[in-house]
Amino acid sequence: MRYDPIKDRLGRFFSRRPVLQKLFYGLLNMFFLRAWYVRREIRRLFGAMSEDRPLRMLDAGTGFGQYAYFVARTFPRAEVVAVDVKQDYLDNARRFFDKTPQAAQVTLAYDDLTQLQTEGPFDFILSVDVMEHIEDDRAVFGHFARVMRPGGYVLINTPSDLGGSDVQDESDESFIEEHVRDGYNRDDLEGKLRDAGLEPVRSLYTYGRYGSMAWRMLIKRPILMLGASWAFLIVLPFYYLVALPLGLIFNKLDMRQDNPQGTGLLVIARKPKV
């Protein structure tokens, strides 16, 4: 499908100026329900881990860098190491951070999570929509456990196996081309984390009934439009005048209920203290 090329093209456009990059981060945080859940859980976990020393976070697969920026801004004493295998993403993020007050807090580096070279220990590891791109997930979880400080947390956000890559039936291709699996089963993901020495402490489905409607309304339909023709950029502002308020309401409703199932999965695990 067209999601990844369009996403990358938009990312390149917004990376031209720091003000545009901040706008881009704001749009990602507003439109994508996963950002609502992830930021909420980060605030909870960092509050639970309050220490006299600065907390260190590994942003494992930083992408555009929006979560590294969020943590650095929200927690001025935090130290963030943001890694990715896409050098162009890292270059764009580095140009942005070099022009922000958070530059001293954030270190950007190329690293392959399956062969992680970045040194710990880390108090918190964040992996947002990354593991569905990696075949050897057990190797990654093993590295997470190795570089995590005892008592530290890891947050994994990923599509679930209940349609997380927007696969409705066998004849429908994944909406996201780069996924190596359509999504995770909750028990399977928790089991792999346990095998790595990390104990799951909180698991929840996201993108339930309301969140899935918001996804189709705020993300999928506009991407399909742009996939057909970039001329739809002229139409999108008018489309969002109607779709955005309703989509944001759906996002809020999704977060306020305990979804019995959903196309997103968020799992938090902890490394036992010695």
Image (tube, grey):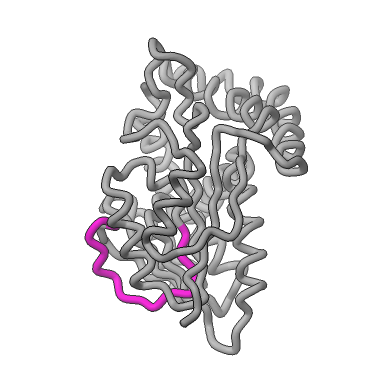
Q: Is 11 within the magenta?
A: no
The magenta region covers 113-126
Q: Residue pushed farthest bottom?
A: 52
User: Which part of the image, by quadrant, shows the N terminus?
Assistant: top left
Q: Nearer the viewer, residue 200 or 105?
A: 200
Q: Position of residue 238 (x, y in %)?
A: 66, 21
Mark yes or no: residue 79 visible.
Answer: no
At 40% across and 31% down in the image, what residue appears?
Answer: 182
Q: Position of residue 272 (x, y in %)?
A: 49, 73
Answer above or below: position of 265 versus 40: above
Answer with left or right where residue 47 lies relative to residue 76. right
Answer with left or right where residue 46 lies relative to residue 143. right
Answer with left or right where residue 239 lies relative to residue 79. right
Location of residue 227 by image quarter: top left
Q: Nearer the viewer, residue 145 or 17?
A: 145
Q: Is 120 within the magenta?
A: yes
Q: Position of residue 176 (x, y in %)?
A: 39, 29
At 49% across and 17% down in the image, what residue appears?
Answer: 168
Query: How many discs appear?
Result: 0
